[in-house]
Image (cartoon, coloured by chain):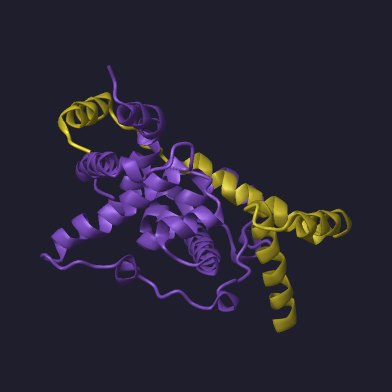
Chain colours: A purple, B yellow
Amino acid sequence: MKSPQDKIFEGEFLPHADALANFAYYLIQDEDEVDDLVQDTFMKAYKAIDQYQVGTNSKAWLFRIMKNTFINEYKRKKRQGQKVTYEEIVTFHDEEESNLTSYTDLRTELFSDMMGDEVMIAINELPRDYRTIMILCYVEEFQYEELAAIFDIPIGTVRSRLSRARGLLKDKLKEYAKGLGYTEENINKN
Amino acid sequence: MREIQQLNDDVLQRVNLYLDGAMTQEAAANFRSEMNHNPAVSEALHHEQSFRDLLRNSVHRRKASPNLIQNIKDKIRTAPH
């Protein structure tokens, strides 16, 4: 006979295991540690299950637990016992949104010539805070409000990080396009 | 030149807010109307959508292994909550 907590766990939490494994990878980029982070996240969620309100956004709740677990456990290991906040491990300082948008755009035709692996390399080269927010927004399809809650940042910062992440990724892809033989004129949209 | 850049930045910013579903209903309706009348805006939307498709299609999605799921289930059987 399963307890109500076990039913919630299996019915609402476990279905997000694949998405959490994906997020874990983009957080730590170490295949060997992905399973540990996923398992730790689920154990913490189970221990805190009484704080979870049934029927609310379990996916965002779990992602937030994973982000906090990553900060407090995995980064601490590497910093020899020191706790750090997410903001301390952000590689770039967030800038004013108005300063971030630059009209980097690439020709659509160019995308068909790009190999998935090259795009993956470019994504993996992005700083962690940009890489993860981009994956959560465009692959996991979280809304701005959910991203703000997961990363503990204002919505304006969500917008600016995404904008900066897109710009950085496009710049990297542009470099790749040049390697394919495209010239500056036919890479840029305008 | 600077004014053109600023105009393009503004278009790109609105395209992204639109695609992210972050506009109010009214702003989204205005944007759609603008898109129908301004080819530059619809072209920018097309490019941005292609960029996102490329991103989505390129990301290798990890899966939690059956062993991992089983380990988690085994652990919660013995864990207090």
Q: Is residue A190 visible?
A: no
Q: Looking at the rendering, in which quadrant would you find the N terminus of chain A?
A: top left
Q: Residue furthest left?
A: A80
Instruction: Say which quarter of the image contains residue B75.
Output: top left
Relative side of A13 to A71, left or right: right
Q: Looking at the rendering, in which quadrant would you find the C terminus of chain A?
A: bottom right
Foreground residue among A84 and A170: A84
Work out whether A31 lies above or below B64. below
Instruction: Say which quarter of the image contains residue A74.
Output: bottom left
Q: Position of residue A82 (x, y in %)?
A: 15, 68
Q: Position of residue B42 (x, y in %)?
A: 78, 54
Foreground residue among A181 and A101: A101
Q: Is residue B16 visible?
A: yes
Q: Position of residue B61 (x, y in %)?
A: 40, 37
Q: Residue furthest right?
A: B37
Work out whether A13 lies above or below B29. above
Q: Residue furthest bottom?
A: B2
Q: How many dots with numbers?
A: 0
Foreground residue among A5 and A40: A5
Q: Position of residue A153 (x, y in %)?
A: 45, 66
Which residue is painted at 53% across and 78% down in the image?
Answer: A96
Which residue is painted at 82% across and 59% down in the image?
Answer: B30
